[in-house]
Image (spheres, coloured by chain):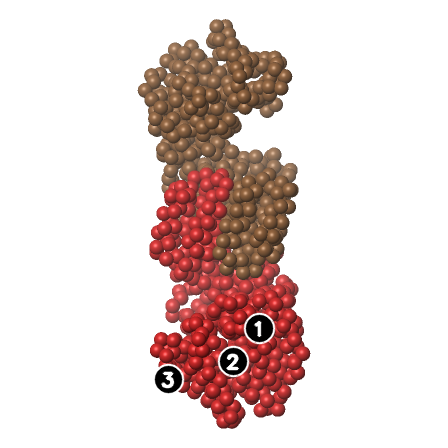
Chain colours: A red, B brown
């Protein structure tokens, strides 16, 4: 049994839904199908989820949101009509949607918002099941509450409860194709709660783990995961196989193919994940697995993310002071700031954190506390940093990967503010000025993936050629 | 006014003391002289301080230590005789020493030990003052209590009290040459307390700061500080000028020219320190200063120290858990373990610490606590690590130092377990297996200080040639 999840662009219109259904029908093992809400049909389009959010917001503010509701209806009506599902289906779908969107039913604002958002996936799942039946398939929509998708009671940020897995396991026993709406579950109290945005990936992963699927297929709109951001490098190399850990490290630093939390259930149940393209299903895609042979490629990918800053603290003989590091980190904890890394010298330590977490007020207070509570000699904040990362399970086993990387960066005149290597066996991280991040990624791509004789300028994607100097 | 401190080998016998006095007399600004206890006269000799410790231990255990006491007397008698100071001086010195060593005077064991140890420096200072007078100089011994060397009440590990500086400042007003015994001071209660071993360097630094000396001259038995351990590399390059920070970083990783704590008073009062050779006083020596021009040498030195280990902890999505790092470090604090560095990946962190601090029992308990209290997925301990360090203030300002270093290490087939760069602007640290540390240091020396065409094998000191494969 395979679990196949389809993203928003795969369900954006009737044509796409037809592709989805033909993919499902092409493999009898694809018996559990998870769907997102219809996404953008073209670049300027609005996702159904965003329409639903506008609608709910307006309803909450003014108690009426007819225009927004009609926009949502219109999307589904068009799909239903083009799929030829008939008036009766259209009426039923519309009425069920209207029930959710026009009737607050005593729900709190955030509960109402969650219910409205979830209607996007829920409606889509019903339509897909209808369409599969219209093609002669045995197919049924299942409601996450009936199926046992129990989640924590955190509006907009639910987490699956451990007891959900045993209940969901019985989905295995259903005959025909089951269509399951992604993105939400139900709290023990019976109220609907959504995962964080993009959470249909999480639903698919939970189901794959619960039914111990042979594979969790995640259909999106790219042929595979690429070793580097394709907006930066034109036609980059594809990743054929990558481990969960590599994927996790890449997603940390700007890779956004797959929802970060979505890997956990699959990882814990050891279910391989396959990223495939709805628009080109015969392409092999990218396999995310527990282990891979290193020989094929030591480095799996290169990523970067900006928006970091560092707070440097020095104090003579800090090194001899038991508890200094703990006290330092406690200040960040008390300020509610999650930090990323803490590279240290002998008598100094830097705390790397996300710039968005450091308001001007917190920055001022932290600096003041470091002098007052820690007796720091010197405190300095550096803004606008980027982290550039090379990820690869096989990397650490080969002498010289660091040398190749740092030599390539030096040749590209990238100054290294920080190097973090030593804990993870999977990645090597370089802190650089945000303005130099693209140049760093290009230099590393050229070193580890470039073809002989290819220049950095030739590697650039059209979209980045104008803005990056190499 | 200059403060000149002379180490144990500079005072090991009469001949050395004559050199010391001629150095002092050669510069009228050398008005404050700090002396250690006589050190080893040859490789198999015993330092007077060690004789005193044996004597005190024996006295504490058995209430008599005649043989050990005579060994101490013998060292000083020989010196006094060869300096021609006469019987009266010899008798007085001996009687004062005997007072300390044969009379516990109600002192606790550790107080008695401190008093016995301090007698080495104290006696030496008296002899040097006698000898200077015998040469016609105006010279006087001063007792640290009379001079105001107030220290904390920590036997064997005293720290100077802030109020000492104002009192000691009046040493400036004394006429002639003042000879000051190193290594000890007095608590407010009036009891004698010693600094940590090698603490005469600290005395000199405190005095230099107190009298705002133009320079603190530290005379030892080498012409200068070398850029690398001369036991490993034959005739290494000399360091002409180095900053306090560079020196501190080097002393962390195995450089032992200068007592680690001794730099602080000089550093805080911005007194330059000059390391000079008693046996070759015309050599310029090494200057330790607040700032130096980078252009001369970007890298100041290379050092390594073994005896480290790392504890690796991983936990999926650790990165999102506010307070994880603080809780981790709290465990080490509660176990009374000071850690050195904490390189981190996305979902993992390693704690680097000194192996001597991690007993088998503590290791077991820490691992257990990491699983139980932190919910770690995986914990792994790696023993026998060394830290290899390149130190240089100018390093960070030049693109490519990291590349040069890592390329040299890769060429020498050194596998990097860890790289720590990013907080200190002064150093770059590589974690390697202890067995590869010498090879790493040699490769780095060759890269940053080697002459063209010189092979690694040619660089080796005779003492290391047999044991290191390059």
Q: Which residue is drawn at 51% across and 20% down?
A: B115
Q: Where is residue A285 in the image (x, y as percent from the top left)?
A: 58, 75
Between the residue at mark 1 and the residue at mark 2, the CA separation in whole angstroms equals 14 Å
Establish whether labels 2 and 3 are both on one chain: yes
Q: Mark 3 points at which residue?
A: A67
The reply to whether callout 1 and callout 2 are in contact (CB within 8 Å) is: no
Judging from the image, mark 2 belongs to the subunit labelled A
Q: Residue at x 40, y 15 (%)?
A: B140
Q: Mark 1 points at which residue?
A: A149
Q: Position of residue A375 (x, y in %)?
A: 40, 41
Q: Mark 2 points at which residue?
A: A122
Question: In what element is the residue under mark 2?
Answer: helix
Judging from the image, mark 1 belongs to the subunit labelled A
Question: In what element is the residue under mark 3?
Answer: helix
The reply to whether callout 1 and callout 3 are in contact (CB within 8 Å) is: no
Q: Nearer the viewer, residue B446 or B270?
A: B270
Q: In which quarter of the image is the C terminus of chain B?
A: top right
Between the residue at mark 2 and the residue at mark 3, the CA separation in whole angstroms equals 21 Å
Which image quadrant for residue B176?
A: top left
Judging from the image, mark 3 belongs to the subunit labelled A
């Amino acid at each position: 049994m395979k679990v196949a999840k389809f993203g928003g662009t795969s369900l954006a219109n009737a044509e796409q839904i037809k592709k989805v259904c033909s993919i499902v029908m092409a493999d009898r093992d694809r018996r559990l199908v998870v769907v997102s809400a219809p996404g953008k049909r073209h670049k300027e389009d609005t996702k159904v989820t965003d329409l639903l959010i506008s609608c709910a917001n307006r309803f909450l503010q003014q108690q009426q949101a007819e225009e927004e509701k009609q926009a949502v209806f219109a999307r589904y009506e068009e799909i239903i009509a083009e799929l030829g599902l008939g008036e009766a289906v259209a009426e039923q779908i519309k009425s069920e949607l209207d029930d959710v969107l026009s009737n607050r039913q005593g729900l709190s604002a955030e509960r109402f918002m969650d219910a409205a958002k979830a209607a996007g996936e829920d409606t889509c799942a019903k339509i897909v099941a209808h369409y599969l039946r219209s093609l002669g398939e045995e197919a049924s929509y299942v409601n996450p509450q009936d199926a046992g998708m129990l989640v924590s009671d955190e509006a907009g940020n639910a987490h699956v409860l451990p007891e959900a897995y045993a209940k969901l396991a019985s989905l295995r026993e259903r005959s025909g194709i089951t269509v399951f709406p992604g993105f939400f579950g139900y709290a023990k109290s019976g109220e609907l709660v959504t995962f964080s945005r993009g959470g249909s990936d999480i639903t698919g992963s939970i189901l794959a783990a619960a039914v111990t699927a042979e594979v969790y297929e995640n259909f999106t709109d790219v042929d595979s995961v690429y070793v580097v951001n394709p907006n930066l490098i034109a036609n980059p190399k594809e990743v054929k196989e990558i481990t969960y850990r590599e994927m996790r490290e890449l997603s940390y630093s700007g890779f956004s193919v797959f929802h970060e939390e979505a890997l956990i259930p699959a990882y814990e149940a050891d279910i391989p994940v396959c990223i495939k393209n709805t628009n080109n299903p015969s392409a092999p895609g990218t396999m995310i697995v527990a282990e891979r042979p290193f020989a094929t490629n030591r480095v799996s990918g290169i990523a970067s993310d900006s928006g970091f800053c560092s707070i440097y603290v020095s104090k003579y003989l800090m090194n001899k002071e038991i508890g200094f590091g703990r006290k330092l980190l406690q200040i960040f904890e008390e300020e509610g700031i999650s930090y990323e890394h803490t590279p240290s010298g002998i008598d100094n330590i830097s705390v790397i954190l996300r710039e968005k977490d450091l308001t001007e007020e917190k920055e001022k207070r932290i600096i003041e506390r470091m002098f007052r509570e820690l007796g720091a000699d010197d405190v300095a904040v550096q803004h606008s940093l980027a982290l550039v990362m090379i990820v690869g399970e096989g990397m650490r086993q080969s002498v010289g990967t660091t040398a190749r990387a740092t030599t390539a960066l030096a040749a590209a005149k990238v100054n290294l503010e920080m190097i973090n290597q030593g804990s993870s066996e999977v990645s090597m991280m370089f802190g650089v000025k945000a303005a130099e991040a693209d140049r760093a990624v290009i230099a590393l791509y050229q070193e580890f993936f470039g073809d002989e004789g290819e220049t950095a300028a030739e590697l650039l994607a059209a979209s980045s050629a104008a803005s990056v100097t190499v």
